[in-house]
Image: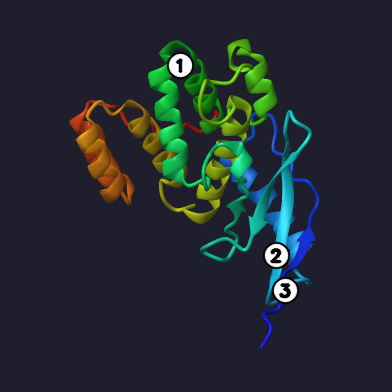
């Protein structure tokens, strides 16, 4: 029996910009899913949504259904991005390479990631304009613009999937830990064992890296 081909439906662009708190982001994104999909769901149906304009003229998409179903999604990371399959570990190791290559420039990159993490500004292009040094790429890995836009949507995905837990904080602090762990043997162990916030916190404590919680804008 021939395998049924997938039907791809493209929704409207979902724009998340400005200092928008995470609960408001979740409402906006989930409502966009509902508005597009409520009468079009079915076996083999895939929904894709453009979410970011990239500097090279391409679009960054998120795709549904994700791995966990419900309102989960996947960030569509293609090979040309330089982020491997776009797994959390791939991105974390990219950030580690950046840190080792150019600590000063990496510090600026982390300022940008932190601003997005706390939802102080969700427009990556605005965040980059404040930090002109990030216009040029590092010698290896993804361009800062693309890296930040992928991370932004991974944070949003964590908010949706792990709304009642520390999803956003877990991902942010996982990136920080991998980028800053000084002992390769312990890092290798952590990459195999860290599956939840508590386990990550124990590894961070061993190397004196502070856990930074998400701060709601007042």
Q: In this image, 208 relative to 154: left or right?
A: left
Count how many numbered circles sit on residues in the image: 3
Q: Position of residue 123 (x, y in %)?
A: 68, 29
Is residue 121 in view?
A: no
Q: Nearer the viewer, residue 151 or 70?
A: 151
- Please state, as top left, top right, bottom left or bottom right, where the C terminus lies in the image: top right
Task: Residue lying at the far bottom in this picture: please name it.
Answer: 1
Secondary element type, mark 1? helix
Task: Mark 3: give few (<14), some (14-19) or many (20+) Cα within 10 Å.
Answer: few
In the picture of the structure, the residue carrying the numbered disc 2 is 46
Measure the alpha-carbon separation of dots 1 and 3: 46 Å
Q: Position of residue 67 (x, y in %)?
A: 52, 62
Whichever of labels 2 and 3 marks the residue nearer the N terminus, that label is 3
Q: Position of residue 164 (x, y in %)?
A: 44, 53
Secondary element type, mark 3? loop
Whichever of labels 1 and 3 marks the residue nearer the N terminus, that label is 3
The image quadrant that residue 120 belongs to is: top right
Which is in the foreground here, disc 1 or disc 3? 3
In the picture of the structure, the residue carrying the numbered disc 1 is 107
Task: Mark 1: give few (<14), some (14-19) or many (20+) Cα within 10 Å.
Answer: few
In the picture of the structure, the residue carrying the numbered disc 3 is 5
């Amino acid at each position: 029996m021939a395998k049924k081909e997938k039907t791809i439906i493209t929704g409207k662009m979902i724009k998340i910009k400005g200092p928008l708190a995470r609960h408001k982001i979740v409402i906006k994104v989930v409502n966009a899913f509902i508005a597009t999909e409520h009468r079009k769901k079915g076996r083999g149906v895939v929904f894709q949504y453009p979410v970011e304009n990239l500097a090279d003229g391409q679009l960054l998409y998120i795709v549904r259904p994700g791995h966990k179903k419900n309102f989960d999604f996947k960030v569509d990371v293609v090979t040309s991005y330089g982020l491997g399959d776009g797994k959390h570990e791939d991105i974390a190791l990219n950030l580690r390479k950046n840190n080792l290559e150019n600590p000063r420039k990496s510090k600026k990159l982390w300022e940008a990631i932190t601003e997005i993490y706390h939802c102080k500004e969700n427009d990556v292009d605005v965040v980059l304009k404040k930090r002109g040094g990030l216009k040029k790429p590092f010698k290896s890995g993804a361009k800062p613009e693309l890296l930040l836009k992928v991370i932004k949507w991974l944070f949003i995905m964590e908010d949706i999937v792990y709304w009642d837990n520390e999803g956003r904080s877990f991902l942010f602090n996982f990136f920080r830990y991998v980028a800053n762990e000084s002992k390769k043997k312990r890092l290798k162990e952590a990459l195999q064992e860290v599956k939840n916030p508590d386990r990550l916190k124990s590894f961070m404590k061993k190397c004196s890296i502070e856990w930074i919680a998400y701060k709601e804008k007042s």
